[in-house]
Image (tube, grey):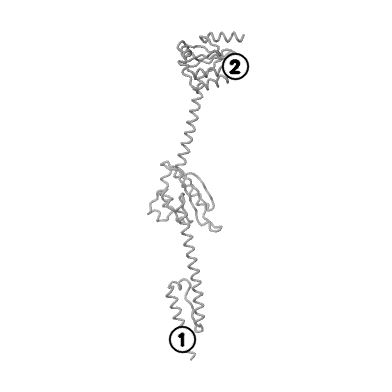
């Protein structure tokens, strides 16, 4: 009887184990083959198989989590705008994203070799200074914990930022991570901004020189200044004349300023108004403005426009204006 019972238990054991193995044929490879004895009951076998199933599920879940982590990491590598390269201490490329291959124009066949030396040999010809690039790479590989940041300039005008740091597993350095960012457009924008700023400075300096030439203020004596004007007088130039007169009177402590308009072809309402305002401003500083050089055609325009220059002292020429000024000073 006992022999029959033992044979029955072994038969049940083979059926249960065989059924579970067919259900998950790779479970034995992961968890190992179960050891069955004659003392095992169907209940104990079920418990053991259930425990094995739980352990198997744990392994499957762990594998799924690892696969998800790898997938997320790969997605992050591909999503970044930087080119990323990871090389182990044996000189093998552990991973590189598409952006890195695009930036360095590396063909797929070369990337598939995963050989950092071959990749390095391929890219250095693109650089303006290959020797400096190679020296920096070798120096970093010789110091596993070193970090570095520099700029790479290419023969075709491209500019990359290069950042490198060790790949750490806990406290151990297991490789090196290289990050490359294409800043060519930013560099071009910075250069264009610098050129624009320089050009603006040159234009401002030219305007200053032209302003000084268009509103020259010549000292005749310690208290007499002469400003000969040539060309037209628009609103902007009228403002320059006013500013130059006020600054000159203040600096020289002048008592008389002679404004000669012999070279002014047209004197309209706006330009005449500017001269009148200048005369009033000079008067507020304790000086007097004398207008000289009014030509006949300009005088006719003044009369036709009904302009009132009664508040201005006028003389026919600069010489008579200077004589008047010297008399006033005396």
- Residue 82 image label: none
Q: Judge the density around disc 1: few (<14), some (14-19), many (≥20) Cα neighbours within 10 Å.
A: few
Secondary structure beneath dot 1 equals: helix
Q: On the image, numbered disc 2 is attached to which residue?
A: 283
Q: How many marks?
A: 2
**Viewer-proximal residue among 79 and 215:** 215
Q: Are marks 1 and 2 in contact (CB under 8 Å)?
A: no
Image quadrant of residue 276? top right
- List x then y, in percent, for residue 111: 40, 54
| Residue visible at 50% across and 50% down in the picture | 164
**Viewer-proximal residue among 95 and 50:** 50
| Residue visible at 48% across and 88% down in the picture | 5
**Viewer-proximal residue among 59 and 177:** 59
Examine the rendered structure and indicate whether residue 92 appears above or below residue 36.
Answer: above
- List x then y, in percent, for residue 173: 53, 56
- Residue found at the far bottom of this picture: 1
Quadrant housing the C terminus: top right
- List x then y, in percent, for residue 89: 49, 56
Q: Which label lies toward us, 1 or 2?
A: 2
Cα gap from disc 1 to disc 2, whole angstroms: 131 Å
User: Earlier along the polypeptide chain: callout 1 or callout 2?
Assistant: 1
- List x then y, in percent, for residue 135: 48, 47
Q: Judge the density around disc 2: few (<14), some (14-19), many (≥20) Cα neighbours within 10 Å.
A: some
Specify whether 3 is left or right of 329: left
- Residue 8 image label: 1
**Viewer-proximal residue among 273 and 9:** 273
Specify whether 245 is left or right of 196: right
Examine the rendered structure and indicate whether residue 91 appears above or below residue 64.
Answer: above
Secondary structure beneath dot 2 equals: helix
Examine the rendered structure and indicate whether residue 194 appears above or below residue 71.
Answer: above
């Amino acid at each position: 009887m006992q022999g029959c019972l033992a044979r029955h238990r072994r038969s049940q054991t083979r059926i249960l184990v065989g059924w579970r193995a067919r259900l998950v044929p790779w479970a034995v490879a992961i968890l190992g083959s179960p050891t069955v004895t004659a003392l095992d009951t169907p209940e104990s076998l079920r418990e053991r198989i259930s425990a094995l199933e739980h352990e198997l599920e744990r392994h499957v879940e762990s594998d799924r989590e690892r696969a998800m982590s790898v997938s997320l990491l790969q997605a992050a590598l591909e999503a970044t705008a930087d080119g990323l390269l990871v090389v182990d201490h044996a000189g093998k490329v552990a991973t590189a994203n598409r952006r890195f291959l695009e930036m360095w124009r590396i063909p797929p066949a070369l990337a598939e070799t995963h050989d950092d030396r071959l990749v390095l040999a391929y890219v250095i010809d693109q650089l303006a200074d290959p020797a400096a690039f190679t020296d920096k790479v070798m120096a970093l590989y010789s110091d596993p914990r070193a970090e570095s940041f520099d700029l790479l300039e290419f023969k075709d005008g491209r500019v990359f930022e290069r950042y490198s740091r060790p790949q750490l597993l806990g406290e151990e350095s297991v490789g090196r991570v290289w990050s490359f960012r294409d800043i060519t457009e930013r560099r071009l924008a910075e250069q264009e901004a610098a050129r624009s700023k320089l050009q603006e400075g040159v234009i401002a300096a030219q305007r200053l020189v032209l302003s000084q030439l268009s509103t020259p203020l010549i000292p005749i004596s310690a208290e007499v200044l002469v400003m000969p004007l040539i060309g037209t007088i628009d609103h902007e130039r009228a403002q320059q004349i006013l500013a130059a007169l006020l600054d000159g009177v203040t600096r020289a402590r002048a008592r008389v300023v002679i404004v000669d308009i012999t070279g002014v072809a047209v004197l309209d309402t706006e330009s005449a108004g500017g001269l009148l305002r200048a005369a009033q401003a000079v008067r507020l500083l304790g000086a007097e403005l004398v207008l000289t050089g009014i030509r006949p055609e300009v005088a006719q325009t003044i009369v036709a426009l009904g302009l009132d220059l009664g508040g201005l002292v006028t003389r026919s020429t600069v010489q008579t204006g200077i004589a008047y000024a010297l008399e006033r000073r005396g």
